[in-house]
Amino acid sequence: MSHRKTAAGPCLALILAVAMLLAADILTGCSDAKQLRVIGDPCERHDHCESTVCDEFVCKPCEQFECKPASPYAAAVLADKPIAYWRFGDSTTPRAFDFSGNGYHGVYVVVNVSQPGAILNDPNTSVQITASNDSEVGEFGGAFGFVGHQPFSAELWFKPTQPHACLLGQVDWDATAEKYKGWFLYYKSTEITLRRSGTNVNAFVTVSTSEWTHVVATFDGVTAAMFVNGTQIVQRASRNPVAAISEPFLIGRMDNWQDYEGLIDEVALYEHALTPGRVLAHFKAGSGT
């Protein structure tokens, strides 16, 4: 057996967080006999399972299960090969599921799952970050620092209940220099911003607390851009390299910043900059426009 694992032993209880309950969900490419689906909750895709047992779940050939067409939105995201993709479709905690197939699973901390989702005509649910200071939907170690000038994209849908907060990122507060190292996304009532190694890329828009907002931040190695609801709002040079830090990637919380409160859905990270055309395709698939 040679499928990918995320963490071992007690570390699994401390890191990670955010998942996809693939029970009665989808496996793409079900005609491939090597693709196996586990029995259990949540269900998980294993590309290589040579034994009859994968971890605590029993594996069977994919054709023994009813294969359903993928969600148009999920299919659009997966077509762009995210390094991690958390749909927040879990009905129970604590295990969180990475839908990308790369195994970045996690554990929810003080959240409410099974909330109404962002995607039109898609039964997949979202997660609610609560007012608790301990509430978060992700600690995934150092996998998403995008160090130096590494290109990346960060995508999510959010529906907040307060006028300003952090959204997600991997940062470390330098108390001596009084600045953040790393990168993160935050919003205020009239802007959504990517801060990458000290450079702010501000999309000046009105943030709704009654409707979902789709956000994508991209960096191609030289220029960063912000997209809101499928439209590019701003781009600017972001020349400073991102320093390697030991702090984990988090969704909904960061040190020395207002913690998020509200709903978050469909978070995806990529090791490349999504094109404007692909960002728009994602938004159209999710909003039905």
Image (tube, grey):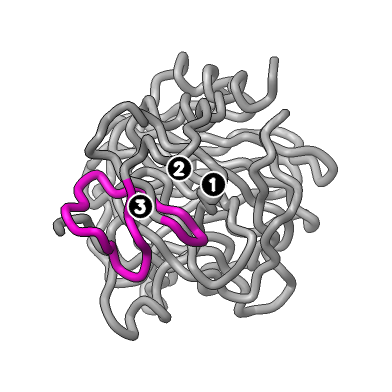
Please tell me whether mark 2 sits on a helix, a strand or a loop.
strand
Q: Earlier in the sequence, mark 1 or mark 2?
A: 1
Q: Residue furthest bottom?
A: 10
In terms of image quadrants, where is residue 262?
A: bottom right
In terms of image quadrants, where is residue 54?
A: bottom left
State how far apart marks 3 and 1 are (Cα). 28 Å
Residue drawn where x is 58% and y is 36% of the image = 215
Question: Residue 268 got which mark?
Answer: 2
Query: Closest to the observer: 269 or 162?
Result: 269
Residue 54 falls inside the magenta stretch: yes
State how far apart marks 1 and 2 are (Cα). 8 Å
Residue type pointed to by label 3: Ser
In magenta, the rendered stretch is: 39-60
The residue singled out by tag 3 in the image is: 197
Residue 276 falls inside the magenta stretch: no
Mark 1 Cα-neighbour bin, 10 Å: few <14, some 14–19, many ≥20: many
Residue drawn where x is 65% and y is 57% of the image = 127
Q: Earlier in the sequence, mark 3 or mark 1?
A: 1
